[in-house]
Amino acid sequence: MTDTDPIETDGAPRTDNPYSQGVRAGDTLYVSGYGPVDPATGEAIDGDIEAQTGRVLENIAAVVDEAGGDGLADVVKVTVYLTDLEDYERINEAYGSRFGEVPPARVCVEVSRLPEDVRVEMDAIASLE
């Protein structure tokens, strides 16, 4: 069995729910789902879907950085959860501008509701070789 290490950082929202911000298993990092929550306030940010998408990706990058990675550059897989697929194209623009020439693999699904009634949440897998 692979040893696992929890990853915790003040750079991403903390919760008192029973899960880790991220878990490192060997060279693989599994990042929990994040909405557009400001880690300093613990509150969802105001702003359009592009701003919310940016905040989500900043939260993911902070966990990757804390695990010894290089932010979004090490992300290999993302799952995007949207409450309205009408936001899909706008999220794609904000999302695409954050990744290089080889963006990670991705799944995008519409869900009926997300915690705190945010419009977008993402989780990620990163390779920390």
Image (tube, rainbow, N blue to C red):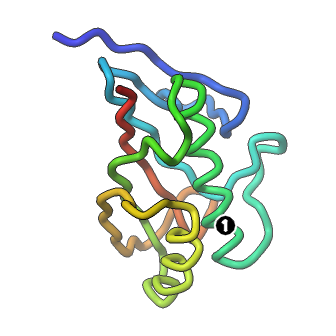
Identity of the residue drawn at 42% across and 14% down: 5
Instruction: Identify which residue, 99 or 126, lies in the foreground.
Output: 99
Tell me if 121 is positioned left or right of 40 in this view.
left
Q: Is residue 85 above or below residue 16?
A: below
The quadrant in which residue 15 appears is: top right
Identity of the residue drawn at 59% across and 73% down: 94
Q: Where in the figure is residue 30, as x and y percent of width and height? A: 38, 35
Q: Where in the figure is residue 38, as x and y percent of width and height? A: 76, 49
Q: Residue type at mark 1: give it.
A: Gln
Q: Is residue 48 above or below residue 17?
A: below
Residue bearing mark 1: 52
The quadrant in which residue 102 appears is: bottom left
Q: Which residue sits furthest left?
A: 1
Identity of the residue drawn at 48% across and 46% down: 73
Instruction: Determine whether the residue tagged by mark 1 lies in a helix, strand or loop.
Output: helix
Identity of the residue drawn at 47% across and 30% down: 22
Looking at the rendered image, the quarter that the N terminus falls into is top left
Q: Where in the figure is residue 116, as x and y percent of width and height? A: 63, 58
